Image: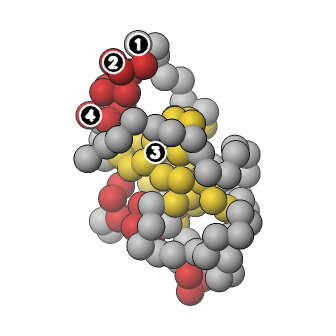
Amino acid sequence: MFELIALMILSQQPLQPVAEGVASYYTVASSSALTASGEPLRDDLLTCAMLDGEFGHYYLVLGENGNSVVCKLNDRGPFAKNRVIDLSLAAMRRLDGEAGLVKVQIFHLGPNPPPFD
């Protein structure tokens, strides 16, 4: 949540979510070794897959529990019904250490987001 507030202050404009719904995750074991962008799929990187969006752009994913993660879009998906984003294993663990599905809001940050952490 802190990242979202900081981003709104830095940008001096309200952020509107580009999508809201359910996030799931996928792993190297359950998917192809390469993403749609041509990058290798790695469980330890903060990446995501969405049906729309430009590869290389970053998205802030805010979970209903208040946890958030910034992910780089490098793949297409999810292809499961009623899902808005697939997260890497590392990204999902940042949102919720135990869950496989999380309700989220997604905010587009662009190709060069402000640094977090």
The amino acid marked with disc number 3 is Val
66 or 72, which is in the foreground? 72
Specify which label sits upstream in the sequence, 4 or 1: 4
Query: Which element carries disc 1, helix, strand or loop?
Result: loop
Which residue is denoted by mark 4 in the rendering? Answer: 2
Residue 79 image offset from top left, x and y in percent: 73, 62
Q: What separation in Å lies between label 3 and label 4 (alpha carbons)?
A: 12 Å
In contact (CB < 8 Å): disc 3 and disc 4: no
Residue 65 image offset from top left, x and y in percent: 31, 45
Specify which label sits upstream in the sequence, 1 or 3: 1
Which residue is denoted by mark 3 in the rendering? Answer: 61
Specify which label sits upstream in the sequence, 2 or 3: 2
Q: Residue furthest top?
A: 12
The amino acid marked with disc number 2 is Ile
User: Which is more foreground, mark 1 or mark 3?
Assistant: 1
In contact (CB < 8 Å): disc 2 and disc 3: no
- The quarter of the rendered structure image containing the N terminus is top left
Q: Name the mark on residue 12.
A: 1
The amino acid marked with disc number 1 is Gln
Q: What separation in Å lies between label 1 and label 3 (alpha carbons)?
A: 20 Å
Specify which label sits upstream in the sequence, 4 or 2: 4
Q: Name the mark on residue 9.
A: 2
Query: Which element carries disc 2, helix, strand or loop?
Result: helix
Q: What separation in Å lies between label 2 and label 3 (alpha carbons)?
A: 18 Å
The residue lying at 35 percent from left, 64 percent from top is: 93
